[in-house]
Image (cartoon, rainbow, N blue to C red):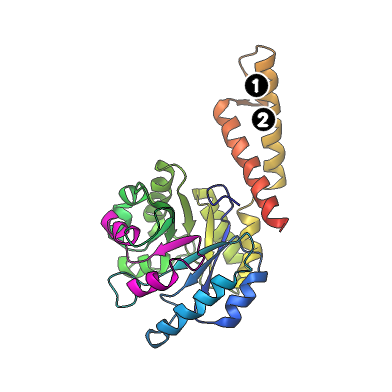
Amino acid sequence: MDLATRPYRSVLYIPGSKDRALDKARMLQTDAIIFDLEDAVAPEAKAEARETLKEALQTDGYGKRAKIVRINALTSQWGFEDVRVLRDAGADIFLLPKVNNPTDVDALADLLDPAMPIWVMMETPMCVFRAPEIAAHQRVTGLVTGTNDLTKDLGCRYRPDRLPLMTALQRIVMAARASRGVVAIDGVYNRFRDGDGLKAECEQGRDLGFDGKTLIHPMQIEVTNTAFAPSESEIDLARRQIAAFEESQASGQGVAVVDGQIVENLHVVAANRTLAKVDAIAQMAAE
């Protein structure tokens, strides 16, 4: 499946050091996997983790799930070795943490094949301020929100409505949308046993414009996939809007109306985007 058109509703973090988790991930209904060598791996385990992950990626078996490797920061003692060991192991995307400006992306781009996409962790105030420049980088195809790090650096309080983070969340989405084709992924929900809270935060992220959400536990996948997929009513409306608009164009009428609302070309563009997402999700499910 084309990385540019695939769904990214659920993006699950998996520790790169744990064989059992790496194996189990092959059977999970997540759209993408972040194989984490950074926060999820202790310093003394990092060398072994990258070899463990290399073997898992070369064995593959992850089907249509996007395989994303989060390396350690290139300013750390582990980042360059992560790239050296894993750049040809079978990853689809490399995810770079601790980014503050586009030149940080240049440092990773110089180490990878020119065709390898790069995603960026948006986890510092400076990174958020420079989000438009980072998203516009020619190698960047995805922005992943690091809400825990942002909360820490901002010194703000956690609130269920995420009001203290709202400026950052919206700026990340706007930067992604200003650079066409860049994916925007929301941050994690830490209370992984709280299904209702997760559902509410997924719906908020979806309504803000995020393409999907990062997850910390497999039990979060189903709720997230449902929230970020078009509903039956949205699919029905999209089809009726397209049909009404096409009929109005064919009959020479200037205006199409569906459910008492005018349908213009911009509504048709959104409707086609909805149906394209439905098709992409169906392709994932058909694996």
Instruction: Tell me what residue is drawn at x 37 percent, y 84 percent.
Output: 43
Instruction: Give the quadrant of residue 159.
Output: bottom left
Q: Given the image, on which type of amino acid does mark 2 rest?
A: Gln
Specify the label residue 190 is tagged with.
none
Q: Is residue 16 magenta?
A: no
Q: In x, y percent, where is residue 53?
A: 50, 76
Instruction: Tell me what residue is drawn at x 36 percent, y 66 percent.
Output: 97
Q: Given the image, on which type of amino acid does mark 1 rest?
A: Ala
Q: What span is colored magenta in the figure?
A: 80-109
> Pointer 2 and pointer 1: residues touching (CB < 8 Å)?
yes
Instruction: Tell me what residue is drawn at x 27 percent, y 56 percent.
Output: 101
Instruction: Tell me what residue is drawn at x 47 percent, y 45 percent.
Output: 181
In this view, 145 is above or below 152: above
Q: In x, y percent, where is residue 142?
A: 44, 54
In this view, 45 is above or below 112: below
Q: CA distance from mark 2 to mark 1?
A: 8 Å
Q: In x, y percent, where is residue 280?
A: 64, 48
> Is residue 124 rendered to the left or right of residue 144?
left
Q: In x, y percent, where is residue 234?
A: 67, 42
- What quarter of the picture does the C terminus occupy? bottom right
Q: How many numbered circles does the render carry? A: 2
Element at label 2:
helix
Name the residue tied to disc 2.
241
Specify the label residue 256 is tagged with.
1
Instruction: Give the quadrant of residue 82.
Output: bottom left
**Towards the viewer: 282 or 244:** 282
- Disc 1 crowd, CA 10 A, few/some/many (<14, 14-19, 20+): many
Looking at marks 2 and 1 on the same chain, the residue that comes earlier in the sequence is marked by 2
